[in-house]
Image (spheres, grey):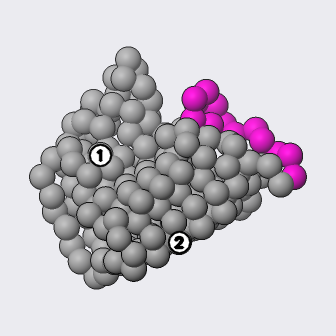
């Protein structure tokens, strides 16, 4: 748990028990998680950045195992923070067999402000129990001010690589200066994602 000022983790390997929040940065200020490898059974999530400010989550590797929901990074309401150069792999064979609405990075519908989600690689699957919701790569509220660019998606469905949380559809906001904006993202089929 890192809820103070200036706390950080660097160059660690963490293998926790199942279905837990592995690193909790809720409300953290000027904190960081760098070069940390997390191998977790159904992380919920692996890194929680809810309401974090001036924080960096950079160059980490998250590998999810197990048959249930797997969530990489929550960014609910974070501000002036970076989520960059992370590898999030939610494509474990067990997840494909019984998926519970996994997500690589998501703000869970709570907008981010003045933050960046850049150059992450997100591997996920969309198979599984449809009653529990399909998985997706990156979920955005569409009302914040974040730059979401140069992310790469693999193994998923192009319509679920980046979604608008709440509708499940691809993002459509394009008004200058309003909402998240993304350029240079690569879809699961290797093609360029339209800018938004």
Residue drawn 24% across and 77% down?
Answer: 12
Position of residue 58 relative to residue 77, above or below, is below
Most extreme residue toward the left, as rendered? 17
Residue 36: x %, y % from top left:
31, 73
Residue 53: x %, y % from top left:
51, 66
Could you tell me how many numbered marks the image carries? 2
Q: Residues within 10 Å of mark 1 (few under 14, many from 20)?
A: many
Q: Residues within 10 Å of mark 2 (few under 14, many from 20)?
A: some
Residue drawn 60% across and 53% down?
Answer: 112
Is 123 magenta? The answer is no
Residue 63: x %, y % from top left:
29, 58
Most extreme residue toward the right, as rendered? 176
The answer to whether residue 164 is visible is: yes
Q: Earlier in the sequence, mark 1 or mark 2?
A: 1
- Residue 44 is marked as 1
Kind of element beneath mark 1:
loop
Examine the residues drawn in magenta and state their main secondary structure: loop
The answer to whether residue 88 is visible is: no
Residue identified by numbered label 2? 54
- Residue 67 is marked as none
Closer to the camera in the image, 123 or 37: 37
- Is 174 situated left or right of 76 in this image? right
Between marks 1 and 2 in the image, the one whose residue lies nearer the viewer: 2
- Is 19 situated left or right of 172 in this image? left
Range shown magenta: 162-176
Residue 193: x %, y % from top left:
70, 50
Quarter assignment of residue 8? bottom left
Position of residue 55 relative to residue 26, above or below, is below
Position of residue 125 relative to residue 63, above or below, is above
Residue drawn 31% across and 67% down?
Answer: 2
């Amino acid at each position: 748990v890192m809820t103070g000022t200036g706390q950080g983790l660097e160059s660690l390997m963490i293998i926790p028990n199942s279905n837990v929040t592995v690193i909790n940065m809720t409300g953290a200020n000027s904190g960081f998680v760098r070069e940390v490898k997390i191998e977790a059974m159904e992380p919920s999530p692996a890194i929680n950045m809810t309401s974090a400010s001036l924080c960096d989550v950079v160059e980490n590797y998250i590998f999810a195992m197990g048959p249930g929901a797997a969530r990489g990074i929550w960014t609910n309401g974070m501000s002036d923070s970076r989520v960059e150069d992370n590898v999030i792999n939610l494509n474990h064979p067990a997840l494909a067999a019984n998926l519970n609405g996994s997500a690589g990075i998501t703000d869970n519908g709570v907008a981010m402000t003045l933050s960046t989600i850049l150059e992450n690689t997100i591997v996920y699957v969309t198979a599984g129990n449809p009653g529990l919701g399909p998985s997706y790569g990156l979920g955005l509220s569409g009302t914040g001010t974040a730059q979401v660019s140069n992310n790469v998606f693999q193994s998923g469905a192009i319509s679920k690589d980046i979604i608008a949380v709440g509708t499940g559809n691809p993002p459509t906001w394009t008004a200058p200066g309003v909402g998240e904006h993304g350029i240079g993202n690569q879809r699961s089929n290797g093609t360029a994602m339209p800018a938004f």
